[in-house]
Amino acid sequence: ETGVTQTPRHLVMGMTNKKSLKCEQHLGHNAMYWYKQSAKKPLELMFVYSLEERVENNSVPSRFSPECPNSSHLFLHLHTLQPEDSALYLCASSQAATGDYGYTFGSGTRLTVV
Amino acid sequence: GENVEQHPSTLSVQEGDSAVIKCTYSDSASNYFPWYKQELGKGPQLIIDFRSNVGEKKDQRIAVTLNKTAKHFSLHITETQPEDSAVYFCAASEGGADGLTFGKGTHLIIQP
């Protein structure tokens, strides 16, 4: 375990479903991130939270909605997704707000939209 | 915004030989350059990072170099071993709370 835990590890959902991905870090970090990893593409930054405030939206479709209730938890709420949203969703944390930019990643949630 | 190009996409080397992965970046303000290793079924793991106030950094069999003028940086792995087989990602950032911009990854295969 890296100190960043993501649940569930695998998720299959229909296009009309609503689901949420959860990320939890026990490292005392002050920044958290959602990345999307698709085959043959670079990791795509979706959302950044620093000191629990969102600082980056990166033109992500509104069917993805992040939530950061405290510095240890990050959620990604999903609704009316498309098949092209199938990917590995990675959460990461860092001490970026205090100058240490090295990420610790979770193992990801493998999402399949059917 | 930042754009990071990474080459090659696949690299196969004999065990014991060296491997080199190269990246270029576009934003001259970038000053933080980490490298990540991703094994099957796991998230990327930071293996080495450096800032642009140093030109080279070494950690056992891994070394990284930076050419700020040309805006490119490289990962060198010497005396490769089977456990080095993985996908390697370079990334760049100008620091602060902004996220990292990653390259597309290099699949490193170590042939026994």
Image (spheres, helix red, strand yellow):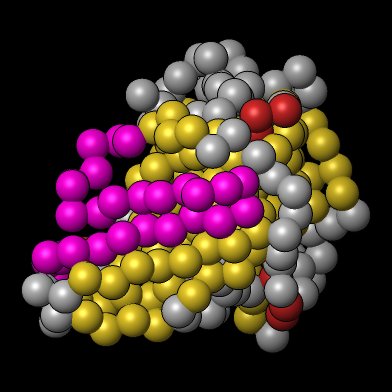
Query: Left of A14 or right of it: where is A106?
Result: right
Nearest the viewer among B26 and A66 is A66
The residue at the point 43 percent across, 34 percent down is A54
Is residue A64 highlighted in magenta?
yes
Q: Residue furthest right?
A: B60
Front residue of A102/B74: it is A102
Query: Is residue A113 something one can see in this rendering?
Result: yes
Give the camera-side residue of A2 and A70. A70
Q: Is residue A43 above or below residue B41?
A: above
Q: In the rendered view of the protein, which quadrant contains the C terminus of chain A? A: bottom left
> Is residue B89 shown above or below A78?
above
Residue B28 falls left or right of residue B45: left
Residue B47 visible from this viewpoint: no
For residue B45, side relative to residue B80 (left or right): left
**Image quarter hosting the N terminus of chain A:** bottom right
Q: Residue at x 36, y 50 (%)?
A: A66
Q: Give how far across and how far down residue A98 sits, in percent.
A: 72, 28
Could you say where residue A23 lies in the image, as x and y percent from the top left? 53, 63
For the point 70% across and 45% down, the residue is A29
Residue at the far front in the pictured view: A69
Q: Which residues are magenta?
A: A57-83
In percent of width and height, residue A96 lies at 65, 33
Tally of marks: 0
Residue A3, given in percent of the width and then of the height, sits at 71, 64
x 49%, y 55%: residue: A74
Quadrant of residue B13 in the image? bottom right
